[in-house]
Image: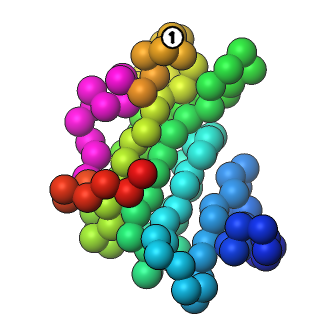
Amino acid sequence: MNWEPWTGCYRVRVGVLFVIFTGHIPIKRRFIACSPLLSQINISACLSGIEHVTVNGESGREARECDYNWVLSIREQCVKAGVTFWFKSTVSLFKRDGITQKVNPFKQTSLAKDQNINIMDGKKFF
């Protein structure tokens, strides 16, 4: 766990991802951003005291694949912990139901929204 004084957060490496963990720092919003999501991860141990989780894939020419099952796994962890969840955007290479599709960068956010899996409970965080 690395302290980042310029953000007021701890950065924790989880597999190939970095999870921002705020711990006991007096801040207004405690959230985890799984970005870019490059593998299946278990964040359930980090959800205590967290209000929100945002997930999105990687975009660009060299973007790596994101599997929809990874997204659903994080969503399920949020459901069990009572934490809001936002699937912000897919990725250039999005795998769902065993099929990988190339997604136009301008459609990645709307495709994520079309999955209808966000749990915001009427809240707006960003």
Mark 1 closeness class: few <14, some 14–19, many ≥20 residues within 10 Å: some
Instruction: State the extent of the magenta-drawn residues as a range.
Output: 110-119
- Residue drawn at x 51%, y 11% is 104
Q: Amino acid at mark 1?
A: Asn
Position of 19 compared to 125: left or right? right
Q: Position of residue 6 (x, y in %)?
A: 78, 68
Position of 17 compared to 24: left or right? right
Q: Is residue 36 visible?
A: yes
Q: Position of residue 48 (x, y in %)?
A: 44, 80
- Residue drawn at x 57%, y 19% is 92
Q: Is residue 95 visible?
A: no
Q: Position of residue 68 (x, y in %)?
A: 42, 34
- Residue drawn at x 53%, y 79% is 27
Above or below, comparing residue 106 to residue 35 in the picture: above
Q: Is residue 116 magenta?
A: yes
Q: Quadrant of the N terminus?
A: bottom right
Front one among 27 and 59: 27
Question: How is the rendered protein coloured?
Answer: rainbow
Front one among 72 and 62: 62
Front one among 39 and 21: 21
Q: Which residue is mark 1?
A: 104
Above or below, comparing residue 53 to residue 99 in the picture: below
Helix, strand or loop at mark 1:
loop
